[in-house]
Image: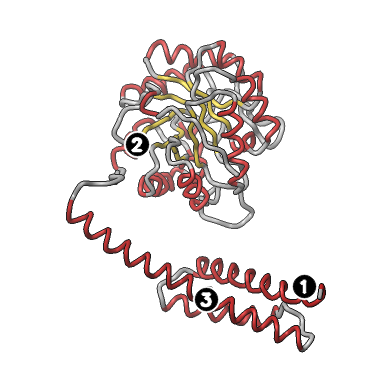
Amino acid sequence: MAKTLDIIPVSEWGFFTLPRPMAIAGPCSAETEEQVMRTARELSDLGLHVFRAGIWKPRTHPGCFEGVGTKGLRWLKRVKVETGMKVCTEVASEKHVYECLKYGIDMVWVGARTSANPFLMQEIADALRDTDIPVLVKNPVNPDLDLWIGALERLNEAGIRKLGVIHRGFSTTENILYRNAPGWQIAIELRTRYPQLPFFADPSHMGGDRKYLREIAQRAMDLGLEGLMVESHCAPDTALSDARQQLTPQAFADLMRNLRIRDADTDDKEYKEGIDQLRAQIDIIDENLLYTLGSRMGVSRKMGEYKRDHNIAILQASRWDQVLAAMQEKARKYGLSEAFVTGVFNAIHEESVRVQNEILSGAEEG
């Protein structure tokens, strides 16, 4: 069972200004002191308060640009002194943490590959123990909500109370539009469990291409997320890592300016009355769904008994394929997506098989 997290509200961190969205921007990688300072000054002039840059870059293959290392922290320290912005970078080990603390880095984040490794998360948590530095945790590379929560718990148990999350999507082998599968449902589930957590989206890594950043960022705002972490480079086409997904500082400012920010709530009486009526309708429909599902499982039990009495196997794969295809076809008539209907009916089928299996198992035990 997930534990309660003891969190200091982000409004007390002294990092971000309201209204939404809170913004973190800067290059994927700190490449040269000139590149870092030029990007930082341009972003600062546009009103940014929190600057990011990768110092150590986890790469799949050796020989790729893996970051400039510790000397880049001196450049971030200079950014902090000369622009007044807060600075942050990614950490993936105990050594990274100690180096960041030594150079006065204001905030760190944990990347997707690291958050998936409980050993590394514990190492980082121990290194950060009882410090006052804020920590943001990206989702693990795979859609594993428990791993994400476990990473947060380890940090919180080490005394880290300025804690937040970054949703950057999930690795996939499927041929999709974006670099990473959005998996918004995982983010929504985490948001539901821990509404007090500051929640950022990373459209740069989710999209993998600057042409998708606006639509992803808008989706994050539509879902009520508080902030965005966006990669911005003074000359993105020449970047040594992830060139396609980085924006110029001016393009970043345009992105932020054109976002439509929706209110979390309102005191408008007409809205309150209208939304309450709609929610009441949803409650009735949901209760009817439960009644229908209960009836459906009642029929499944009878089918299990019938198969048992006639010595027939529970799983009839060809029959299920026909049922699912028919439901997918009918779904279009009701304006439902094929993926949604497939997920729902597969879940119903799994429960039906479980119910029937219980009947067969009970007969064998008897």
Question: Number of numbered discs present?
Answer: 3
323 versus 341 height, above or below = below
Three-letter residue code for mark 1: Ser
Which residue is under mark 1? 361
Q: Position of residue 204 (x, y in %)?
A: 48, 40
- Badge 2 crowding class, 10 Å Cα cut-off, few under 14, some 14 to 19, many 20 or more, is many
Q: Nearer the viewer, residue 359 or 255?
A: 359
Question: What is the C-alpha distance between the residues marked 2 and 1?
Answer: 54 Å
Residue contact at pointers 2 and 1, CB within 8 angstroms: no
* Secondary structure of residue under mark 2: loop
List the residue tagged with mark 2: 21
Mark in the foreground, 1 or 3: 1
The picture places residue 285, in percent across and down from the top left corner, at 39, 70
Quadrant in which the C terminus appears? bottom right
x, y (%) of residue 166?
49, 37
Secondary structure under the numbered disc 3 in the rendered image: helix
* Residue position marked by numbered label 3 in the rendering: 328
**Mark 1: secondary structure:** helix
- Lateral position of residue 18 relative to residue 23, left or right: left
User: Where residue 239 appears, x then y in whole percent?
Assistant: 52, 31
**Amino acid carrying mark 3 in the image:** Gln
Q: Earlier in the sequence, mark 2 or mark 1?
A: 2
